[in-house]
Amino acid sequence: MIHVLFAPPMAAWRARLKMRSHFHYVLCLSEAKGMDISMKLEIEDLTKQFQDVTAVDGVSCTLTTGVYGLLGVNGAGKTTLMRMLCTLLRPTAGRILWDGQDIFALDGAYRRILGYLPQDFGFYPDFTVRDYLHYIASIKGLRPAAARKRTAVLLQQVGLAKVENRKMKKLSGGMKRRVGIAQAMLNDPQILILDEPTAGLDPNERIRFRNLISELAQDRLVLLSTHIVSDIEYIANEILLMKDGRICISGTTEDLTAGMPEQVWLVSVPRSEVVSYTKRYKVSNIKTLHGEARLRILSAEKPAENAVLEEAMLEDVFLHYFGERAGGENAV
């Protein structure tokens, strides 16, 4: 769902362009200067509790330059973790360090090098794309001349230069997500955090978005959360699987698939036996063909005489750890 805010008169908006104010999800920037950046974000035993629910449970990892994919079903704790990394939530225990310093102590100096795209972001529906980005730039402390120059560059980069005068309410879902990326990049952040950025996009937009993320990842740290394997399988330098508030395993796609304790088998069975196999094994895919079914099965042992070994994929790793298919019916 997109949160829509009613627009003030344009004249009033222009008069307030230099104001430093809060706009829903946008992280305000400080006037701190000279921050030494070594591109190292350390998460140490991070925990977040909401009354009797532990959303994040003792997470520890170190992130540097590159693309990191945070993969898990909804409710795994991904959004809570990201909101703590953006200083929007304070942890119950543990700490987050940037260049060896606590991010909450750094305060605005940390937010100055941070870009964030939440799952849902607000906008004034009658603003044009360009006016919206200029408005967000003013909140982030960019001078008008710099804001205009940066906006023009980003509109080209996200492929929206031709629709810069179109009103936000007239954009497709994919275009709105690309505007979201552009606003997160206005301050040229060293850390870019994207929470389920491809939610609701069609396959073509997903591909466009993945290519854009790869392009933006140069010389910065990008953390991308998703429950859809294809979003990160080919662009993430490292993948972190999150389950029940914990990072259960991490590594490259090759590391994760090579380290699977189960093997992957391709089995052809009569259609009448499909239910029996799904009850006994983890089945990642079923393809019906000429009266029989071809099953992709995860099993430590050979599940049938005619079973053939297959190379494991990240989708299989997801099934092994979560017990369900990535992006499937139970992972919406």
Image (spheres, rainbow, N blue to C red):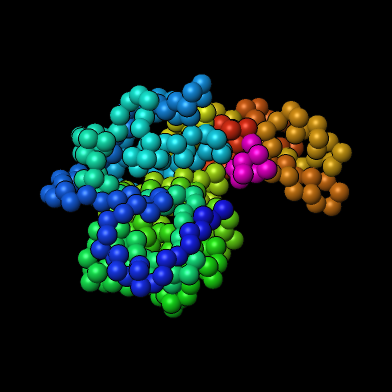
Q: Which residue, as the protein is rendered here, is positioned at the far left?
A: 34
Residue drawn at x 54%, y 71% is: 170
Q: Which residue, as the protein is rendered here, is positioned at the far top?
A: 52
Residue drawn at x 14%, y 50% is: 33
Magenta segment boundaries in residue numbering = 324-332
Choose between 272 and 190: the one closer to the eye: 190
Q: Is residue 44 visible?
A: yes
Choose between 209 and 194: the one closer to the eye: 194
Q: Position of residue 113 (x, y in %)?
A: 26, 50
Q: Please identify the quadrant where the C terminus is shown.
A: top right
Choose between 86 and 36: the one closer to the eye: 86
Q: Position of residue 270 (x, y in %)?
A: 84, 41
Q: Is residue 283 left or right of residue 60?
A: right
Q: Is residue 305 visible?
A: no
Is 329 within the magenta? yes
Q: Position of residue 94 (x, y in %)?
A: 33, 25
Is 68 within the magenta? no
Choose between 138 and 272: the one closer to the eye: 138
Q: Is residue 218 left or right of residue 322?
A: left
Tell me: residue 23, above or below residue 320. Answer: below
Q: Is residue 126 left or right of residue 301?
A: left
Residue drawn at x 52%, y 28% is: 244
Tell me: residue 145, above or below residue 123. Answer: below
Q: Quadrant of residue 110?
A: top left
